[in-house]
Image (spheres, rainbow, N blue to C red):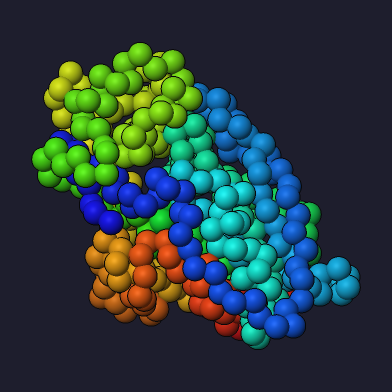
Amino acid sequence: MSKFGFLIPVVVLSAGLSFAQVKTEVPDVVPGAKPVTVEHIKIHGASLEGNLAGEAVDRDAFVFLPPSYGKDKHRRYPVVYALHGYSIGAEQWTHEIHVPQTIEGAFAQGAKEMIVVLPDSKTGYGGSMYSSSATTGDFERYVAHDVVNYIDAHYRTLAKRESRGLVGHSMGGYGASRIGMKHADVFGSLYIMSPCCMSPRRADGNNRAGGGTGGNDIEKTVAGFKSPADSAGLPFFARAQLATAAAWSPDPKNPPLYLDLPVKDGVPQPDVLAKWAANAPLAFVDQYIDALRTYRAISMDVGDQDNLRFDTQKLHEILDSYGIKNGFEIYHGTHTSAVADRIQNHVIPFFSQNLCAAEHCK
């Protein structure tokens, strides 16, 4: 995996994501694991209504109910919300992390039972960045409020922050970082997996590794676009740049795409670049230290063959510098190879230990 820089700052994503995260190692089935119940539902996003790109406001979600859910009719459960990465949606995310098998395996190995929810945040550009945008919709609030409120209203949850966990991988790791910092009143424990897009990017020159499109080229390419659907055939990094612009530099006065690119007429746009930099968690984390202190537990991990490990470690070191206890592990693997194993053997056990599983917790 290599970092990629346009003539202007750009979101860095793994080139492997262009292959839709298909290379993941599957943990062995745990003998005696009891089946969970899987429900494929639609959740209405009031926070997404009126978005200029015409993104769907009724969105897929997968809900995994623990083995005892249908038998113990009075029991309430903690909930983990798991955010998918760029270029895939909730349905494909289920295959990448091999659920329900990995959830069942975690329970069989001793993890306390919980509800697991996979909401969908895929857009016409491949991903929402879990951000608040007039163009694609307020996906930050959609996850933190619309999805959480729906799950609390329709399932037997422990409806309090101490019993809610948030986790995400890659773009979802960015989302977990962003939403976790800004909505610490909603979630009580936080797990960040191989997060992308953590730091502002400087101009590195026109390095086209991975089949990207430079700032000048992308401006010319989208000149004839009529909608986000026109971006489907673009190279991975070029499309990711449009997703970033739609999320971080929306422009209601710039139809038909309603976004501003970091380059206009071949000239870098400082105002747009400033907006992109303002959305980098490593740039705004210092503003949310008090919120981060309220978490019961925070952990993060990343593969030793993943260039995203450098920024992940920076976030760990920042939290350390403020005296905020957090777990951090660099494991053996690529950006995607171990994600299913991490879910079964690390993420679910982490939330088992740190989410409140009772009506009253200290």
Residue 331 on image: x %, y %: 36, 76
* Residue 30 location, quadrant: bottom right
Residue 123 on image: x %, y %: 51, 36
Residue 332 on image: x %, y %: 35, 75
Residue 132 on image: x %, y %: 46, 40
Residue at the left extreme? 205
Is residue 202 visible in the rendered structure shown here? yes
- Picture layout, residue 335 above or below residue 61: below
Is residue 324 visible in the rendered structure shown here? no
Q: Nearer the viewer, residue 135 or 184?
A: 135
- Number of marks drawn: 0
Q: Residue at x 24, y 54 (%)?
A: 2
- Picture layout, residue 50 above or below residue 351: above
Q: Residue at x 15, y 45 (%)?
A: 202
- Picture layout, residue 351 above or below residue 180: below
- Relative side of 111 to 214, left or right: right
- Relative side of 51 to 247, left or right: right
Quarter holding the N terminus? Answer: bottom left
- Picture layout, residue 38 above or below residue 240: below
* Residue 228 location, quadrant: top left
